[in-house]
Amino acid sequence: MSYKVLITDYEFENLKYEEVIFKESGLEIEFLKAQCKSENEVIDQAKHVDAILNQYAPLSRRVIQSLEKVKVISRYGVGVNTVDLDAASEKGITVANVPDYGVEEVSNHALALLLSFARKITYLNSEVKKGNWDFKAGIPIHRLNEQTVGVLGFGRIPRRFIEKVQTLGFKTSAYDPFVSKAEMNEVGVNKLELDQILKEADYLSVHVPLIKDTFHLLNKDRFRLMKKNAVVINTARGPIIDERALIDALQKGIIAGAALDVTEDEPIDKASPLLKMDNVILTPHSAWYSEEAMIELRQKAAKNIVQVLRGEKTPYALT
């Protein structure tokens, strides 16, 4: 039996790793390449395929209801906010992600952003290049063990991030309604409710998934709970933060800074005030990336499809 697999969209130069997985699967697989941007484009391309490999193209309820044969949707990445999980479940379609490919990369990136602020690396670099050779340009800088890192989420990535910041001496606390206080305490983390963690954190690192309950989780009211010296770090998803409220909080000195690998709209709007702020560090949704992580991501995303088409259950199934 032959199968058709649609790759809705991709940013890679080629699909050589996916091709190898499909070729070695023992299945007869024809895969179709596309660069879909809209629901209509996905509907047009996916109507008669058996599986979908997806990066950013929207797989809404409308799209999923149009699918006639699809057995599995596999997503390049951890987040599945591009996919309507309820609609897929109702149609009996397996949705799978790759939750473990970039744990080291994302936790390291969040740590790098944190340390850039804690030691004011990017700011002092800019001052020196302007001709200002004076440590006082960075005043004040505090010892790491005198500061608290608050973490939103307690999955694979935030746990690894916490291990790393604890090694450096930071005090740590976390918010995750699905994890017990005892489980956090086992690894030296203080479990707090959301409002409390906002009030206590010197650095707040965001690691929750983007779902209905976390959309604009950080908003105008919550920024006002934070310390004036607080810095927000986001390596998760842009819409978890209300960006307009963040800009307002930064402009008014309600919080001290932000380090963002993700923004509400990507690429970031060229007119965004964030681009002109000295107290903001921006990277282009690159926290996940290393050569090794990219290969692992692509191989595992393709393997999800192969396993389901073989009648097996992928360990990464979400529906």
Image (cartoon, rainbow, N blue to C red):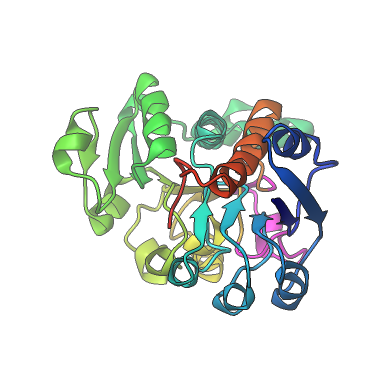
Our reading of the magenta stretch's main secondary structure is loop
**What residue is shown at x 44% (from left), y 37% (from top)?**
157
The mark total stands at 0
**What residue is shown at x 69% (from left), y 51% (from top)?**
1
Residue 306 occupies which quadrant of the picture?
Answer: top right
Q: In the rendered image, which quarter contains the C terminus?
A: bottom left
Q: Which residue reaches farthest front?
A: 1
Instruction: Inspect the magenta stretch and tell me whether residue 270 lies in it.
Output: yes
User: Looking at the picture, how far across and down is residue 164, in whole percent?
Assistant: 42, 25
- Camera-side residue: 43 or 173? 43
Q: Give above or below for 16 relative to 145.
A: below
Q: Is residue 284 left or right of residue 161?
A: right
Residue 193 occupies which quadrant of the picture?
Answer: bottom left
Q: Is residue 235 visible?
A: no
User: Looking at the picture, how far across and down is residue 265, in whole percent?
Assistant: 66, 65
- Camera-side residue: 51 or 123? 51
User: Looking at the picture, how far across and down is residue 296, in whole percent?
Assistant: 63, 31
Query: Which region of the structure is painted magenta?
Result: 264-284
